[in-house]
Amino acid sequence: MIRRISPLEMTIGVWLATFFWISPLIAQDTFYKGKTVRIIVGSAPGGGFDTYARAIARHIGNHISGKPTVIVENMTGAGSLRAANHLYRVAKPDGLIMGHFLGGLLLGQAMGREGIEFDARKFEYVGVPVRESSICALSRRAGVTTMDQWLGSKTPVKMGGIAPGNATDDIPKILQSALALPIHLVSGYKGTSEVRLAVESGEVAGVCMGWDSIKATWRKALESGDVVIVLQVNPRALPEIAKVPLAINLAKSEEGRRLIEVGVHDMSAIFRPYVVPPGTPSERVEMLRRAFLDTMRDPEFLAAAEKATMTIDPVPGEEVKKIVAGLFQLPPALLAKLKDVLKW
């Protein structure tokens, strides 16, 4: 016998379905309303990571239900390792804390770097604002302004660095091995802002770092010619500096090419990750991921980014998570060689 559903029962059913569908959205809106979201940046104020984080903080709250206040806090130490460990071990997984640290640390875990107290596979990834394009820049006053001069230098060229796991350290080490490039790495600066000051004072000759960071924070020196871009460490030449040589084309061997590809090129998509602690409620992770991508499309944010010469080329959180998982599937021999070169 077929039982007919009464109009009253149908109305109640529709009401219940609507309630259970919309109630999580109401709960999320209620949760973030009046709250403060903190972005913990693992490097010093004034650097590229800090510049991007503060630009994002000014806009992302408008795309989160409840419109929370978003602030940036800097937690320096060990090339942002302190911030990464804090996010994993100390930070409360409630959706109110995001971390922004060096993506090189994620590869560091796969290679068994000491001091890492997190499992990269357990972080929840919100997204990356730009795929990193890496370059090496030298001060004109150092007297080396072309790759021919650098390759032929009788003395190692001093390059400023922050710490292992940072591009400022890792790229010079890889180039030293892959290109036989004469380099003396001076590491230990708290952030790229300090490295820039060291270059300007003559303490070091240059730095290898993100092209987007340099454009956003060192624009006057580039425009004046006081700082010269001498090498790109990218899969393809950037249109803005198309005549600057590519490191991959100067590699001395196939092993050298693979070191550049895995150690630099493959890391470009995850170099600037925004993450939340493991255990953060899934609905809040998804809300932050949507808000992050919506911010990357926000006309006001894009206008501000263009004014600050910040490139925006986002990588969704889900893609970042897959790339990180792939780091733990690299051939052991290649990981061992990278570890030896990077000396982690």
Image: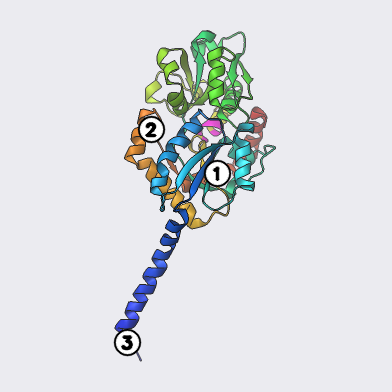
**Above or below, 187 relative to 112:** above
Going by the numbered disc 3, the residue's amino acid type is Arg
- Tell us which disc is closer to us: 1 or 2: 2
Residue placed furthest toward the bottom? 1
Tell me where residue 91 appears, x and y as whole percent: 60, 47
Whole-angstrom CA distance, mark 1 to mark 2, is 27 Å
First along the sequence among labels 1 and 3: 3
Magenta segment range? 262-267
Tell me where residue 273 appears, x and y as whole percent: 51, 40
Question: Which residue does the numbered mark 1 point to in the structure image?
Answer: 324
Task: Residue at 63% x, 42% y: name it.
Answer: 85
**Main SS class of the magenta portion in the image:** helix
Return the residue nearer the eye: 55 or 264.
55
Q: Secondary structure at mark 2?
A: helix
Question: Which residue does the numbered mark 2 point to in the structure image?
Answer: 305
Tell me where residue 334 appears, x and y as whole percent: 62, 35
